């Protein structure tokens, strides 16, 4: 079972909170780009503000249309604050390469990032809550949810699930090599270029009492974009 279907728009911005003003040529507002980054990421950061204090919480998540599902302990401060405040901010960043220029000033990274604003609310429907938690498992390890025991009613009560409905979002993408100054191109003794970065995995390590074979989705595990 998967979380209930949700609206999926073709454009998620620009909006007053997500319009990219610094290097706007790197901005993307189409849902295809935003969703691809969210689907490749593992960890998002949830930002909330309450009583003049800012809280930033890293957490795993799952996406269904223009909705993100987050989870934590029932008393999780950031989730409860996001729900009571209504609005929250979620960010995800993927780093694709280190960009080394001839000058220190022009060193950079190639990245893909998303900033999203939206409304947060607690998921209280038991079926949606269970489906959201299984979707989070499948987001991290595709195919895993169907092989695990689903959350029990007691485990559902011990977990808070927050639904974050994206109101507006923008992606920002940098690709390519360094942007050296013309005067620096003659510095032949200095190497310049890109160092690609990828997520890699080791061999699965079973628990000592496990007799089941390694499932195919682990032996062939790859995140999108990995070689």
Image (spheres, rainbow, N blue to C red):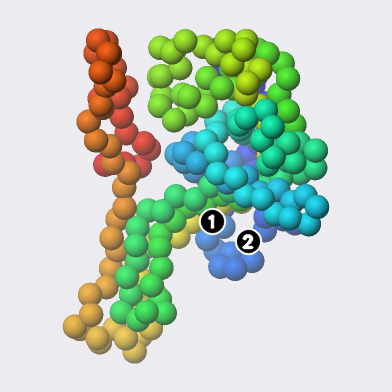
Q: Are marks 2 and 1 in contact (CB under 8 Å)?
A: yes
Q: Specify which label sits upstream in the sequence, 2 or 1.
A: 2
Image point 74% across, 51% down: which residue? 49
Q: Which residue is mark 1?
A: 172
Q: CA distance from mark 2 to mark 1?
A: 8 Å
Residue at the outermost left position = 189
Direction from residue 215 to residue 138 in the image, left or right:
right
SS at badge 1: strand
Q: Quadrant of residue 157?
A: top right
Q: Position of residue 141 (x, y in %)?
A: 40, 27
SS at badge 2: loop
Mark 2 neighbour density, 10 Å: few (under 14) some (14–19) many (20 or more): some
Q: Which residue is mark 2?
A: 20
Looking at the image, is 75 positioned above or below residue 112? above
| Residue 111 visible to an observer of this rendering | yes
Residue at the outermost front position = 208
Looking at the image, is 195 positioned above or below residue 8? below
Q: Quadrant of residue 32?
A: top right
Looking at the image, is 139 positioned above or below residue 225? above
Q: Position of residue 38 (x, y in %)?
A: 52, 40
Image point 47% across, 10% down: which residue? 149
Kindly identify which numbered label has been placed on residue 214: none
Q: Position of residue 3 (x, y in %)?
A: 61, 20
């Amino acid at each position: 079972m998967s979380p209930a279907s949700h609206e999926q728009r073709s454009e998620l911005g620009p909006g007053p909170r997500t319009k990219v003003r610094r290097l706007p040529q790197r901005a993307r507002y189409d849902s295809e780009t935003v969703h691809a980054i969210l689907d490749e990421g593992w960890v998002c950061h949830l930002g909330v503000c309450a009583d003049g204090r800012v809280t930033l919480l890293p957490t795993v998540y799952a996406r269904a249309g223009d909705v993100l599902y987050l989870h934590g302990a029932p008393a999780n401060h950031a989730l409860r604050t996001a729900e009571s405040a209504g609005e929250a901010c979620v960010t995800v960043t993927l780093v694709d390469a280190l960009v080394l220029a001839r000058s220190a000033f022009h060193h950079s990274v190639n990245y893909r990032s998303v900033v999203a604003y939206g409304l947060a609310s607690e998921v209280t429907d038991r079926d949606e809550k269970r489906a959201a938690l299984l979707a989070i498992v499948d987001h991290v390890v595709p195919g895993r949810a169907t092989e695990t025991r689903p959350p029990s009613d007691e485990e559902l009560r011990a977990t808070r699930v927050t639904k974050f409905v994206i109101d507006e979002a923008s992606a920002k993408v940098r690709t390519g090599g360094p942007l050296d100054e013309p005067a620096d191109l003659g510095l032949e003794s200095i190497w310049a270029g890109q160092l690609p970065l990828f997520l890699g995995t080791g061999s699965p390590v079973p628990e000592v009492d496990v007799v089941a074979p390694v499932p195919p989705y682990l032996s062939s595990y790859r995140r999108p974009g990995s070689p």
